Amino acid sequence: MDSAAPKNRFTPKEFWAWLAEVFDNYGILILAGLLLVYPFFFSALNDSIIWLEDNDWEETAEIVAEIRGFVPSTPLMIQILIYTLFGIAFNILLGNTGMLSLGHCAFFGVGGYTVGIMHAWIKPGTYAPDWMVSAFKVLPLEISLITCIIVSTFVAWLIGTICSTKRGVYFAMVTLSISMIFYYSAQTFDDLTGGTDGLGGLENMRLGSINLRVGIMDANITYYFVFVIAVVFIALIWQVLRSPFGHVLRAVRENEDRARICGYNVAKVRLMAFTMSGAISGVAGALAIIYGETVPIENIHFITSGQIVIITLFGGAGTFLGPAVGSFIYWYLRQLMSVEFVKYLDIFQYWEAWVGGIFVLIVLFVPSGILGTIRNMTLEYREKKLLTKKAVENVLAKKTEDEAATDSE
Amino acid sequence: MPILETRNLSKHFDALVAVDSVDYAVDSGELRSIIGPNGAGKTTFFNMIAGDLLPTSGQVIFDGADVSEVPAHERSHLGIGRTYQITNIFPKLSVLENIRIAAQSRKMTFNLWSTVPSHKELVEKADEILERINLTEKRDELAGTLAHGEQRYLEIGIALATDPKLLLLDEPTAGMSPEETLQTGEFIKGLADPLTIVLVEHDMEVVLGISDIITVLHNGAFLAEGTVEEVRANAEVQRVYLRE
């Protein structure tokens, strides 16, 4: 059929469809690739400014510096990566199991405090017993991270057994109140946690195996450290969500009673999802304090739970990479408003209000989030294309039939 | 030996007695019906057999074991499958996935390290069931977009995918047109033996047409039981149904 052959492969619509297809299949890899080279890109930008200044191109240097203000810095990208991991872990519950937890700050905080407390207090002349201090001259991060995973898994399991039998708004309220218990405990035991001042004294955090100092001093090294851990755990979540267990989660989200009558132990499934989500949120919390070299009490405050809900809904709870998009938008907007926009308009110093306003708009007008909406649009387009194709095929088939009929006559 | 037996089974909601000391027994391979006017306790009776509700008193004995206190998901594994009066499917999952996820429950729940496509046998089983319930063409559509009658069939398919020994159908023809109802009756008859089927029905035609034995409940209590002719001739039954 010559008439059915495509005449022009690159009509704009086809190009977008092709792009969507590529992003669907290789989106994660492309994103990971871009993130992998990001620090080089940002360093190059910095270097170019210095180079321009050295070569008496002052004006151009100023323009590039101005542009740099609108490019997310490596430290900001670290923050975005951490909250991407946190958001994707949180989304095991919200997007996949249909459980809205308002208590994820507890895990984020517990993960952070576990690592923070170990590094702050396993030192000579503090609370730590002598054998511990002599065992680790400098506590390696590997040990504290593994401890952090164990502790946050246990805490998540414990909280999960209490509240994963609750539904909907009750579940949200119970997780919220339990997380407040953790917050007030952190505040009360300030000898250990530093209380409202935050926990400091974490300046020597090293990966023991390769003797690499990680922390606020070197953004590039910390970036790659966070990147590797985030990628490992995101890959882990990705596998779990595509496994048979992941499909059970979606079944429970869609219709809990049906899932139960199908023979699934719904309570156990929910507990498992909750524990996994909490444990990985704890890892994200640990990464956050490793980069900041301090544990601010805000990490365990409800405001962190609110942040992660916003981030996840921004990007789209129904999509895997939604929290990544949400995290980027949230932190980037925040940075832009509080650092750049504020130079022109004072009103941008109240960035929370602006981000809140945008959040309201998103919830009202694109309730499936940014990535969710894009995905729905692509699906719709594909459906249409498929229907058109079918219709064309039908017409052609009929034509051939008619022709055959006339021929035989 | 009966596959399902209830002894003195009762359910009280506070002062309301929904099911009142019902003794009931079904033999393996039978196709039985339970009828009764609205509020007769038919659905509550079903809920206690399937485990959605726990009885106030009395026993449910399935396959020789007392399952009165066994949770619903475990009863599913013992071999009790059910459908609901109000269609109960996974509306936002594909038709295939609806059946596949039900079939998967027989093999695995906490399988985290494999992928779904690698378990071909589950998809094959689902396709086979789709063939039986005549939904092969719609396999990739969202279950929620199916027509009402198709959704009723899909729900039966979901129940079949869990390999039940006993299938409880709660008003399978609810909301169907007269033709669909007749077809469904034939379909259900085709499922029986070796499968044991108990259905609750409002539609007397279907019930009378396909059931071996009919049980009548009234106000939560046992009223009559027998073949179609016996029940029809029963004066008590006539009184209850005529009054309605």
Image (cartoon, coloured by chain):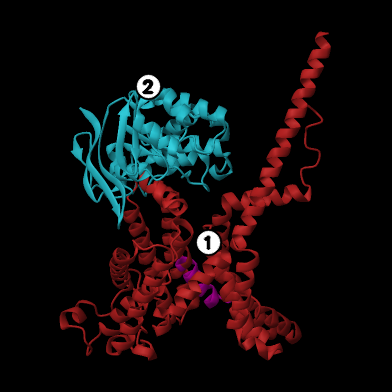
Chain colours: A red, B cyan
- The image shows residue A382, relative to residue A220, as above or below, that is above
Residue B139 seen in the current view: no
List x then y, in percent, for residue A331.
Answer: 56, 75
Which is nearer the eye, A349 or B154?
Answer: B154
Q: Is residue A85 magenta?
A: yes
Question: What residue does disc 2 label?
Answer: B229
Q: Magenta span covers which residues?
A: A73-86
List x then y, in percent, for residue A146.
Answer: 30, 67
Gap in Å between the C-alphas at discs 1 and 2? 58 Å
Do the residues at pointers 1 and 2 share their chain?
A: no
Question: What residue does disc 1 label?
Answer: A317
Using a 10 Å C-alpha cutoff, classify the residue at mark 1 as few (fewer than 14 neighbours), some (14 to 19) or many (20 or more). Answer: many
Which is nearer the eye, A339 or A253?
Answer: A253
List x then y, in percent, for residue B229.
Answer: 37, 21
Using a 10 Å C-alpha cutoff, classify the residue at mark 2 as few (fewer than 14 neighbours), some (14 to 19) or many (20 or more). Answer: few
Q: Are marks 1 and 2 in contact (CB under 8 Å)?
A: no
Element type where label 1 sits in the image: loop
* Residue in the image at 47% along x and 45% along y: B86
The amino acid on which the numbered mark 1 sits, given as a three-letter code, is: Ala
Prevailing SS of the magenta stretch = helix
Which is nearer the eye, A348 or B215?
Answer: B215
Q: Nearer the viewer, mark 1 or mark 2?
A: 2
Q: Quadrant of the C terminus of chain A?
A: top right
* Residue in the image at 62% along x and 85% along y: A339
Residue A311 seen in the current view: yes
